Amino acid sequence: MTDRTQYTPGPASGAQIRKDRGQNGEEKWTLILVRELRHAPEKVWEALTDPAHLREWAPFDADGNLGAVGSRVKLTTVGAPMPHVTETTVTRADAPELLEYKWGGFDMRWELEASAGGTRLTLWINIGHRFIAMGAAGWHICFDVLDRLLAGQPIGRMVGPEAMKFGGWQRLNAEYAKQFGIETPNWPPQAAQKS
């Protein structure tokens, strides 16, 4: 494993948000992240679907492979204060180009497009408005970890509360909040003061 202390994430980039209306008229926010990876789509696809690979970089563990339509897989959020397990069914799996499923009730869509240097990876994920900058910062770091893993220079998974303590995550959270024009939430929340 490569020394994690050498890792510093680059500036906030490759992200946008979209606001739509759900079926009942409620606000529905989508975070869209794009990352150029130096690896072939087939290699990236394996990292997105194989449980062993997901354990190295993703914010959840999977108890099965996500690479086939109809697969029922339990996803366990890593670092959650209380165990958070959701079962998902893969709704699209067009290897190595498109993957869709839900995680914790949120739609996830992964698009892989071959590019000159490897793969343009795009993630579309529904997320609560107040968590958009935090989500962008977290996925930014996940994608950095993924890129290094695929290059054979793993630095180990950084997700959840562990990532939030990392100065790079805090900087990214503030940068994405500014980029999206939203207020940076106080995170982690301060304990209520006693009067």
Image (cartoon, grey):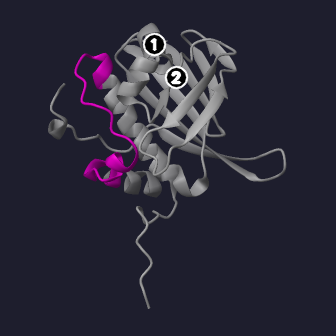
The residue to which callout 2 is attached is 63
The residue to which callout 1 is attached is 46
Q: Which circle's residue, 1 or 2, is located before the other in the chain?
A: 1
Picture quadrant where residue 129 is located: bottom right
**Residue 20 position in % (x across, y down):** 72, 46
Picture quadrant where residue 97 is located: top right
Provide the residue span drawn in magenta. 148-170
> Is residue 169 one of those drawn in magenta?
yes
Q: Name above or below for residue 72 compared with residue 25.
A: above
Looking at this rendering, what residue extends furthest in the bottom direction? 195
Q: Residue at x 51, y 25 (%)?
A: 62
Which quadrant is home to the N terminus?
A: top left
> Is residue 12 one of those drawn in magenta?
no
Label 1 vs label 2, nearer the camera: 2
Residue 161 in sight in this render: yes
Q: Name above or below for residue 130 compared with residue 85.
A: below
Dot 1 crowding, Cα within 10 Å, few <14, some 14–19, many 20+: some
Residue 146, labelled with which disc?
none
C-alpha distance separating marks 1 and 2: 15 Å
**Residue 182 position in % (x across, y down):** 52, 60
Q: Nearer the viewer, residue 85 or 39?
A: 85
